[in-house]
Amino acid sequence: MNDLNGGTRRLVISIIFGAVITFLSGLFLNPFSYRRLGVSHWGIPLPWITQIVYPNATKILKWAELIVDMGFWAIVFYFCYYLIYKRETKPKKTGC
């Protein structure tokens, strides 16, 4: 039962950090996106904000890409968090 609580806690923390990392990635232009003349893309790895480059243009939020991006970063964070947790809880070998 304790492992279930720890696993649930890791999952919730991963989802929260996935959302935070996704929103922080929205502050930066996407270097991997196809650069079309006059369109800017924000968000890494998927561009989930687009804006046509002209004065007072509105930014377009792409919900599907946003959710996939959150899932991607949550999985990456969960994997890293799990590896660190596993390494810290690994029993120490004693001499022999």
Image: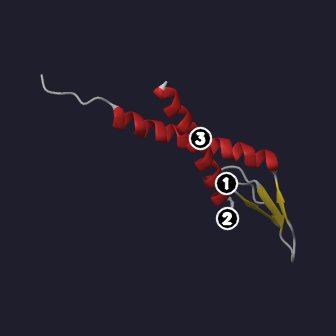
- Indicate the amino acid at tag 3: Val
Q: Closer to the camera, 45 or 27?
A: 27
For disc 1, the marked residue is 32
Q: Is residue 1 visible?
A: yes
Count neighbours of disc 3 (C-alpha within 10 A) and say few if under 14, some if 14 to 19, many if 20 or more.
some
Q: In this image, 34 relative to 87: left or right?
A: right
- Residue shown at the point (73%, 54%) measured from the top left: 47
Q: Position of residue 62 (x, y in %)?
A: 81, 52
Q: Quadrant of residue 32?
A: bottom right
For disc 2, the marked residue is 27
Real-space Cα distance between discs 2 and 1?
Answer: 15 Å
For disc 3, the marked residue is 12
Q: What element carries label 2?
A: loop
Q: Closer to the camera, 12 or 33?
A: 12
Location of the C terminus by quadrant is top left
Q: Position of residue 34 (x, y in %)?
A: 75, 55
- Indicate the amino acid at tag 2: Leu
Real-space Cα distance between discs 3 and 1?
Answer: 29 Å
Q: Quadrant of residue 24?
A: bottom right
- Residue shown at the point (62%, 54%) measured from the top left: 20
Q: What element carries label 1?
A: loop
Count neighbours of disc 1 (C-alpha within 10 A) and say few if under 14, some if 14 to 19, many if 20 or more.
few
Q: Can residue 37 be seen in this view?
A: no
